[in-house]
Image: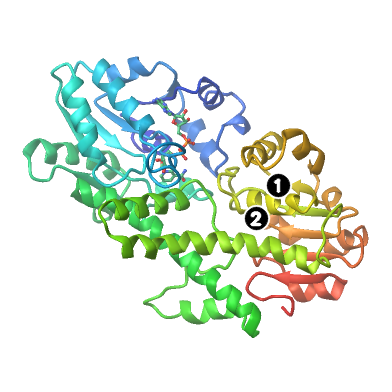
Amino acid sequence: MAVIAQKNPNIKVTVVDVNAKRIAAWNSEDLSQLPVFEPGLDDVIAEARNKNLFFSTDIDAAIDAADMIFTAVNTPTKSYGSGKGMAADLKHIELCARQIARVAKTDKIVVEKSTLPVRTAEALKSILDQTGNGVKFQILSNPEFLAEGTAVKDLQEPDRVLIGGETHTEEGREAIQALVDVYASWVPKDRIITTNVWSSELSKLTANAFLAQRISSINAMSELCEVTGADVHEVAHAIGQDSRIGPKFLKASVGFGGSCFQKDILNLVYIAKSYGLHEVADYWEQVIIMNNHQKTRFANNIVHTLYNTVSGKKITFLGWAFKKDTNDTRESAAIYVADALLEEQAEIVVYDPKVTAEQIYMDLDKQNSRSPEENRRLVTIVNDPYEACKSAHAIAILTEWDEFKLYDYSRIYKDMIKPAFIFDGRDILDMATLKAIGFETYCIGKGKEA
Ligand SMILES: NC(=O)c1ccc[n+]([C@@H]2O[C@H](COP(=O)([O-])OP(=O)(O)OC[C@H]3O[C@@H](n4cnc5c(N)ncnc54)[C@H](O)[C@@H]3O)[C@@H](O)[C@H]2O)c1
């Protein structure tokens, strides 16, 4: 919404949220206090805020004043009842629809920005139409394809914008055009795709499934590389030269995280099952199974390499965020690797340039594997990477932050317990240099002989 405001100075954008703390942080004078860290976002906020971009907790007033309402609430995996652990939880989106229906006094276009199961617009329309005050609603699907870490650039120069609506009615086509006009102020027309609502809703789930599948595919190969002496980096480069495959998104890693891939595939699997398409469901579920395996085998490898015991050993995590250039930790591989090592009574020290200690403890506590006191006893969070590695038996790279490539590893090595191990779960460090320093090395997709 910040980028929409920046690119459309004549449109007033009001962002509302039930979370008053978040809204206060979005209004913070100190731009380093914004709730989301994204490169370049502070500049966009500085440019548009309090000109045509406002942050408020007065949701009713914003609904009342709006011609177009984007619903971008969270749609996590259901943690209760039918579809638990698989289906998307639509309670927040339904609450939004009911609030819009209650408050609206003039016709509105309601835009689904959240990622939703295919055919959600039908349910929204029925709630809006039946509980509304005789107001006419048009529902559009406009899924978001930005990637965290590059969100501002992805929004300013999108590969495409997708808008789904009622293409068969005049009102539907007008609503689609109104949203096309918002994006057309900066997005070339040929990158704005319009479809029917169901295609748009399903395209978002499909895009995430394909992206996650690519990661699981290269990760499956990474394990095979490690046992055969092939190098996953070389394999990825070789296959990526094939224009049908392409070079992007072929980086082996300790596994994908983030709030979207897993939840969206689980949702896809659930939808396929609910239509009785079991082969389709099983096919996509394998992407998640592979991802979980990758995290588990990384943790197991650490234990196995450290002479089958990590009890009382200090292991340093460089990185906690699920990827670089974000402070988002949702579903981060680091959480699962830490959990597995803590089960083996390891002591973990974490350094991440952007993630707070409060967030790291919250992530661990949410696992419910041990008491909060125990998590605080076994896990220490420090602000200095050299301090973090002092007296450690091993370092594990969990996030591909660029700064990790620049450290003085000779200095780090000197202060570690010998033999000193380094486990690169992101394939970002030069193993030959580390070996020459004296480290025992392991790199995902290359193994110990890297
Ligand atoms: N994070 C991403 O990179 C990304 C990318 C594409 C799509 N999406 C989709 O966008 C949606 C939101 O994702 P997110 O990562 O921003 O989630 P989030 O949990 O960070 O933010 C959702 C916000 O909605 C607020 N909210 C919940 N119910 C509300 C209500 N009834 N009224 C007003 N505010 C309410 C919450 O307080 C929260 O601040 C999800 O459906 C997600 O799948 C996210």
- Tell me: 158 left or right of 367: left
The picture quadrant where one finds residue 181 is: top left
Distance from mark 1 CB to nearest ligand 1 atom below 8 Å: no
Q: Are marks 1 and 2 in contact (CB under 8 Å)?
A: yes
Distance (Cα) linking label 1 and label 2:
8 Å
Q: Against 175, is 303 above or below?
A: below
* Residue 174, position as x, y percentages in the image: 13, 37
- Tell me: 53 left or right of 396: left
Tell me the element at label 2.
loop
Type of amino acid under label 2:
Thr
Tell me the element at label 1.
loop
- Tell me: 3 left or right of 443: left
Residue nearer the viewer, 363 or 38 = 363
Mark 1 lies on residue: 352
Residue appearing at x 84%, y 70% in the figure:
439
- Tell me: 69 left or right of 229: left
The C terminus appears in which quarter of the rendering?
bottom right
Give me the disc on residue 399: 2
